């Protein structure tokens, strides 16, 4: 059967025309829903709210909603609105993240805080949260509770990241807790919403939720690798943004653990560079060059692969079908993303 390419993250491919049609139609409806949800009576708010919508993006979360819905009725009325909700929530967090990270670029365009200012970026994120809540209200109290729980986990993850690990806590373990909240929670909800809105049975809902949780961790670890290994054209943001802002990512945490355990001079020196002023472009470039050649980056890639394989394994109880094959391919795509 001919391989068919679906518009979505990583150029996901499927081998079934009906699935392709469902996903394509669903994602197109999500785009319309995003434009509708970001329209305000105040033109400036519309411009700011649509800034990142128009910049594009992988639409990873809406795609997962569409694929999860294949395990029930993929044409059920709540599927597209729930996909719009998760993408609006994700977009809102990007506005806030860019303020916290002082990022200049997002999705290949100037970040909202760089184009306007921090206040506009924060308030625009709040506006998107409000619009997501309005859509949720029409999906029923269970959907509201699910989203509220996920949002609590997301914010908790961000606070844990800001606070840092407790004294004596393993920094790598702490970091995995952070990304489970910041990234895994919303991707897990994407799988959950798709299955619930399609009327899938409870066992399938649980499987797709766990799959999303594990895939979300792999997805974030792949982003950690990209922050170091890619250029801005590939990642859509300035390389080394997390490094420059002192945000701990897995490659850096693994480097620090190696330095603490073995005390190799080159590792200690690289840690010292990381602790210095990385607003200097030359210094940041040197740190990136060294990290790209360091075993810690390879270890981070291996950990990304491990979580992606755990996500794939969680799908085993599901019946064999094209949708399951597409979900498995998403695991492969995340691994490819990490190089």
Image (cartoon, rainbow, N blue to C red):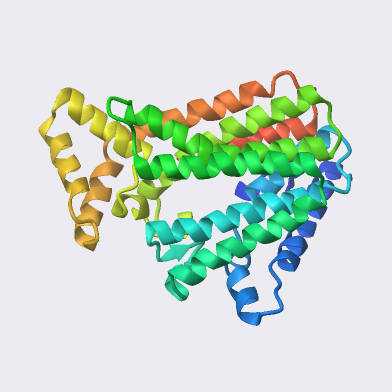
Q: Quadrant of the N terminus?
A: top right
Q: Nearer the viewer, residue 289 or 175?
A: 175
Q: Residue at x 60, y 80 (%)?
A: 44
Residue 66 visible to the viewer: yes
Residue 320 shown left or right of residue 298 in the figure = right
Which quadrant holds residue 72?
top right
Location of residue 242 in the rendering, given as x and y in whole percent from the top left corner: 36, 51
Residue 111 horizontal/vertical position (percent): 47, 67
Q: Is residue 335 visible?
A: no
Q: Is residue 325 left or right of residue 290?
A: right
Q: Quick one: quadrant of the C terminus?
A: top left
Furthest-top residue in view? 317
Q: Position of residue 294 (x, y in %)?
A: 26, 37
Q: Quadrant of residue 75?
A: top right
Number of labels in the image equals 0
- Viewer-proximal residue, 300 or 75? 75
């Amino acid at each position: 059967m001919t391989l068919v390419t679906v518009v979505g993250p990583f150029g996901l491919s499927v081998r079934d025309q009906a699935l392709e049609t469902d996903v394509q139609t669903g994602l197109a409806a999500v785009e319309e829903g995003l434009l509708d949800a970001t329209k305000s009576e105040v033109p400036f708010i519309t411009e700011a709210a649509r800034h990142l919508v128009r910049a594009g993006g992988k639409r990873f979360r809406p795609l997962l909603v569409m694929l999860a819905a294949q395990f029930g009725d993929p044409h059920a009325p709540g599927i597209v609105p729930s996909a719009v909700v998760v993408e609006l929530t994700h977009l809102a967090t990007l506005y806030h993240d860019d303020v916290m990270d002082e990022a200049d670029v997002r999705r290949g365009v100037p970040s909202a805080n760089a184009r306007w200012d921090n206040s506009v970026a924060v308030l625009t994120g709040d506006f998107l949260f409000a619009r997501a809540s309005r859509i949720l209200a029409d999906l029923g109290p269970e959907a509201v509770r699910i989203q509220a729980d996920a949002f609590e986990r997301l914010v908790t993850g961000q606070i844990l990241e800001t606070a840092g690990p407790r004294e004596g806590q393993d920094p790598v373990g702490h970091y995995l807790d952070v990304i489970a909240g910041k990234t895994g929670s919303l991707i897990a909800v994407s799988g959950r919403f798709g299955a619930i809105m399609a009327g899938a049975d409870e066992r399938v809902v649980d499987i797709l939720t766990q799959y999303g949780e594990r895939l979300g961790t792999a997805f974030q670890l792949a982003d950690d690798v990209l922050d170091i290994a890619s250029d801005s054209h590939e990642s859509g943001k300035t390389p080394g943004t997390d490094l420059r802002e002192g945000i701990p990512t897995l490659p850096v945490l693994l480097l620090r653990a190696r330095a603490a355990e073995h005390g190799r001079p080159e590792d200690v020196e690289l840690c010292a560079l990381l602790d210095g002023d990385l607003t200097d472009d030359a210094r940041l470039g040197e740190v990136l060059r060294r990290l790209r050649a360091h075993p810690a980056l390879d270890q981070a890639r291996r950990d990304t692969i491990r979580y992606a394989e755990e996500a794939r394994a969680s799908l085993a109880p599901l019946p064999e079908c094209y949708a399951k094959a597409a979900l498995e391919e998403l695991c492969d795509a995340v691994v490819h993303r990490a190089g």
